[in-house]
Amino acid sequence: MLNPIWLDTFITLVDTGHFTKTAEKRFMTQPGVTQHINKLEQACGYSLIERSKKQFELTEQGRLVYQYAQAQKKNEQALIEQLSFDSPYAGQCTIACSGALALGLYPALLSLQQRHADLVIRLKAAPNQQIIQEIQTGKVDIGIVTDVPNPSLFDVTKLAQEELCLVLPATIDRVFELWDIAAVLSELGLINHPDAEHYLSLYFAKSAEQSLQSLNIATLAESGFINQISQILQPVAKGVGFTVLPKSAVDCFDDHNAIQVFKPPQPVIETLYLVKKKNRTLAARFDMVIDKIEQVVV
């Protein structure tokens, strides 16, 4: 890397066209200016100026180095300006959450972008563990998860609670004579998705439905897989299988007449947590974004 002090001396020399004036402007001795230029030439491996008595001309390599030095100076000035600029309505926000939550959250976040043209929202749908990993590595600014991560590594805020829904085809009561939910699920097969295993294990454990508590998730037949959250309920609506999703995702489905939600003895509730890396100070724009998230999920 070229020494920035030598580059600054070189810029001043080219701009003034004189070693003595450069020394005055840089508060240096003239031999000191000469030394900077000599060291810069050695670092570049080329002569940057052609000396003629008290005058000089730039070589072709000197012109390139001068352009480079000017660009570096402008970039540094731009960086300093950016560091001091923290607009509450501009900049990039990278957020990660489950696909089900993203379905309802993205339209609200998009409305912020419509009002603030310099705000850039990047919303990523991912499972819990991936969200935690990417917050830790800095790929994601904030995330919404359902499991509390290590408090020594993350700052965690409780956001809200949401019900999980076991979703079946609306025609299921005409297909099965007896309402044996475990048998129904085994017969239908699972419409799998990235969060299905997590939702199922939680639902089977907390629904207080005895037949489900003894049902082995690993033995359930899979009737299909899809990672597009807006399409997960389409095969269920056509009688192809069943699935488990948060209530917010079910509420967003258009054809409610084609599906039904099983009512367990005890509602299954999961808690949503807002997570960021421990001790990370977020930019001002995140106040507005987090406020919008709270409006949607609470």
Image (tube, grey):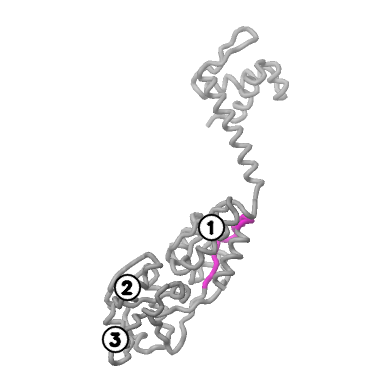
**Between tags 2 and 1, which lies in front?**
2
Residue 225 falls inside the magenta stretch = no
Q: Amino acid at mark 1?
A: Asp
Helix, strand or loop for disc 2: helix
The segment highlighted magenta reads: 272-285
Residue 144 location, x and y as percent? 51, 66
Q: Earlier in the sequence, mark 2 or mark 1?
A: 1
Name the residue rendered at 53%, 56% in the picture: 121
Residue 237 location, x and y as percent? 34, 76
Tell me: 96 left or right of 292: left
Using the numbered discs, state the Cα–Cα distance from disc 2 to disc 3 in whole angstroms. Answer: 19 Å
Q: Considering the image in quadrants, where does the C terminus appear?
A: bottom right
The foreground one among 142 and 109 is: 109
Asked which quadrant contains residue 58, the reply is top right
Asked which quadrant contains residue 20, the reply is top right
Q: Which residue is mark 2?
A: 235
Q: Which residue is mark 1?
A: 141
Name the residue rendered at 55%, 67% in the picture: 274
The foreground one among 73 and 112 is: 112
Given contact means CB atoms under 8 Å apart, are the residues at marks 2 and 3 in contact? no
